[in-house]
Structures are given as structure tokens and as C-alpha cells.
Image: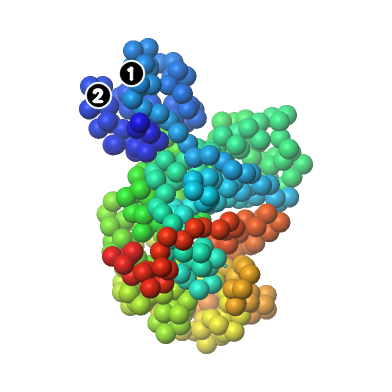
Amino acid sequence: MINLLDFDLAGLTRYFAEIGEKPFRAKQVLRWMHQMGAGDFGQMSDLAKSLREKLAQQAVIIAPQVRSEHRSTDGTVKWLIDTGTGNAVETVFIPEDDRGTLCVSSQVGCALACTFCSTGRQGFNRNLSVSEIIGQLWVANKALDRTLAPNASPLAEERDAGALREKLVKGERIISNVVMMGMGEPLLNYSNTVSALRLMLDDQSYGLSRRRVTVSTSGIVPAMDRLREDCPVALAVSLHAPNDALRDRLVPINQKYPLKELLAACRRYLERAPRDFITFEYVMLEGVNDSVSHAKQLIALTRDVPCKFNLIPFNPFPDSGYVRSAPEAIRRFRSVLQAAGHVVTTRKTRGDDIDAACGQLAGKVRDKTKRTQRNMEVVE
Ligand code: SAH
Ligand code: SF4
């Protein structure tokens, strides 16, 4: 059976052409699925009965299954999404005063084995399908609609929930931003990620602004070039180190795409990007990459790339071997960058009580690779 949640608008239009239906039908069905959350052709009241029956015979609408839902006292919600064979990925909703951000996963595990990342430590199992990526928005929208509906909110007393409920009442979207910062490297699941991004942007489905959809990558240079052409959205690059020797250790894919190439790709990306800067993510690891001299190297390194920095206090996990930089070290690092004229944000840790921090996603992945040795093959 064909799962219609696996199609973006172009794909669904092609499918409808194959079954002898007009392109506008694809738009209607897309709206039903993604805007109304319909999971059943019977609900699609403006389609002819004959078409509904035809679709029911050959297609399905199957969103991923939620295994569990966890709510933090700060309003953060985490869903564990079942991906079969005992594996799961995570989706996290982070409400703030002026936006609601959904942190979305792209792969079950990750082959890139960054040494400070719990997902990377677990190895790689498989790519998520389009329906499993976009399904995370589908599932979150449904769950948030339900929990934030007037008089039905267990979150009512909690921070941010009031503002979000107001939005819902006014018919505004609760999820205003998406960051591909959950499990996996989105640019190594390229075509599924791009189809899912198109659905996030398309007015017939989620209608999000290009500037509010962010792909985070460890720096897969050829895929960054493709994304710039195929579907330019905001880009965050996981830098984490100001020189190749250190980055080779922390982000092993650097051995394949070293800093000079990566920064050149960032400059090329900016020619088409919806924002006029790249966000550089920088995890703060005590005694590893957090000195004043690292900050100065970072300034020199990124001289030619319009950018902002996002400092991420390291989220510890068992046996990681790393320690989060002290708040004072993070402040010092930030002020060196700021003194050079950079905009710097320091990520607040949210949802600590439910283990929801992006990049620190619980749940064990059944590794299908021989890990680090095989990384480079996976990348090819
Ligand atoms: N694979 C992509 C996107 C997912 S990771 C990437 O690497 O960019 C999202 C962000 O969380 C990345 O910047 C990643 O380096 C960071 N991260 C991973 N593990 C972390 C940890 N333990 N503490 C803090 N940030 C972490
Ligand atoms: Fe993969 Fe990103 Fe984790 Fe590196 S930081 S192992 S690329 S998920």
C-alpha cells in the first residue's frame, strides 16, 4: 500500500496523474492530511465518493506511532516515536513567548560518531522515511491541539501554555519553527529530508516560513550545495572546534570535509539562503574547546562568513568522558566573541526533567553498522 504521507506536493500530484486524477485533487488531499490532520479518506468531504473509495483501495495515511509522551514543568513536550524493531526517535516541542519550536529527527541513530553526542555513540540503524519525518509535525500538531484546547489543558497552569492556547483560539499555528536538530544527520538522508522540508514550507500543508525552518548539519559539504539549490532554508552548522586537529577528534566527518571546505560551502550557501547569516553551533566542553584562545581562533576562522554563534552547554550522558563548561567559562567565551562584534546566544537547557535537550536523546538504537570504521562508506 502507498502511504500518502510519504509524498510532497509534486510527488502527490504525480501519483494523482497516474491514477487519472487532476492536480488540484492532490492539493485538496494534502490540505486534508496536513492541515486538518485527516487520517481517513472518509473524512475528506469535498472529494467525490468514488475518489474516496478509489484511494481507500490503494493507499493509506499512516503516521508514525507515538510510544510515549513526556511533559516538562517548563512546557516542553517530548514524544518517543516508534520506528519498529525496538527502535525509537524523539521529537521535542519547545514553547517560548514568541514562538513554538519543534525539534525533529531525521535518522534512527547516526553514523557520524561525534564523540560528545549520545546519538553518535549509539551508531546508525536507518534513515527515516518522509512520512516518519513529516509525521513528527503531524503527531505534534495533533497532540498540542488536544492538550492546548480551551478547558482541556493539563498545561494550563504552566509557563507559556496560556499564550499558546490564545494562538490556537485565534487559529494561529502553535508550531511556528522547526529545527532539524533531533537524532541523525539530515543531509545524509537527503531526499527524504528535502521532501519533508517542502511539506513544511508548502502553503497546502504546514506553510512555515523558510526563515523559520532550520537544517542543522555537521558539515556534509556536497549536500549543503545541493540543499542551496533544491530547498534553501535556514542553516545551522555544528562547528564545535576552531581548528582541524580538534575538530577531527570531536566531529570525525571533518577528516573528509575539513574546515576550509566547510566554510567555503557556508559562503556559497549564503548566496541563496533565506537568512543572511549561518548559525554556528558550538558545544561547550570543559577544558577541550572552551578557552579564550579557542574563541580567538574561532573569530579568525569565521572572519569571512556572516554568522551568529549558538553556544550549547554540553548535555552530559553516561560515560561520555566530557564535562559541561562552567558558566563562567561560557560567559568568558561569549564575551570574547561579542567583543569582536558577533551576535552570540547561549542555549538555555529546557526540559531537563524529561531528558529533552536536543542532541541528547534517550533510547537505545540497534546499531546496524560497524560504527566508526564504516562511517566513511555511509557518507559516500
Ligand atoms: N546531525 C546534526 C543535527 C543533530 S544534532 C548536527 O550534528 O548538526 C543537533 C545539535 O546538538 C548539533 O549541534 C550537535 O552537535 C549538538 N549536540 C550533540 N550532542 C550534544 C550534547 N551531548 N550536548 C550538547 N549538544 C550536543
Ligand atoms: Fe550525528 Fe549530529 Fe550527533 Fe554528530 S552531533 S553524531 S552528526 S547527530
Residue 199, percent from left and from top:
39, 40
| Residue drawn at the location 47% of the way across and 31% of the way down | 35
Left or right relative to 356: residue 132: left
Number of numbered discs on residues: 2
Tell me the SS state at disc 2.
loop
Does the CB distance between marks 2 and 1 fall below 8 Å? yes
In which quadrant will I find the C terminus?
Answer: bottom left
Q: Name the residue under label 2.
A: 19
Q: Tell me if mark 1 has few (under 14), some (14-19) or many (20+) residues whose alpha carbon lies within 10 angstroms of its own.
A: few
Q: Is label 2's Cβ within 8 Å of ligand 1?
A: no
Q: Nearer the viewer, residue 293 or 115?
A: 115
In which quadrant will I find the N terminus?
Answer: top left
Residue 323, relative to residue 18: is it above or below? below
Left or right relative to 276: residue 318: right
Q: Which of 124 and 186 is in front in this view?
A: 124
Q: Tell me if mark 2 has few (under 14), some (14-19) or many (20+) residues whose alpha carbon lies within 10 angstroms of its own.
A: few
Residue 128, percent from left and from top:
42, 49
Q: Can residue 176 be seen in this view?
A: no
| Residue drawn at the location 50% of the way across and 73% of the way down | 115
Which amino acid type is marked by label 1?
Lys
Q: Mark 1 points at which residue?
A: 54
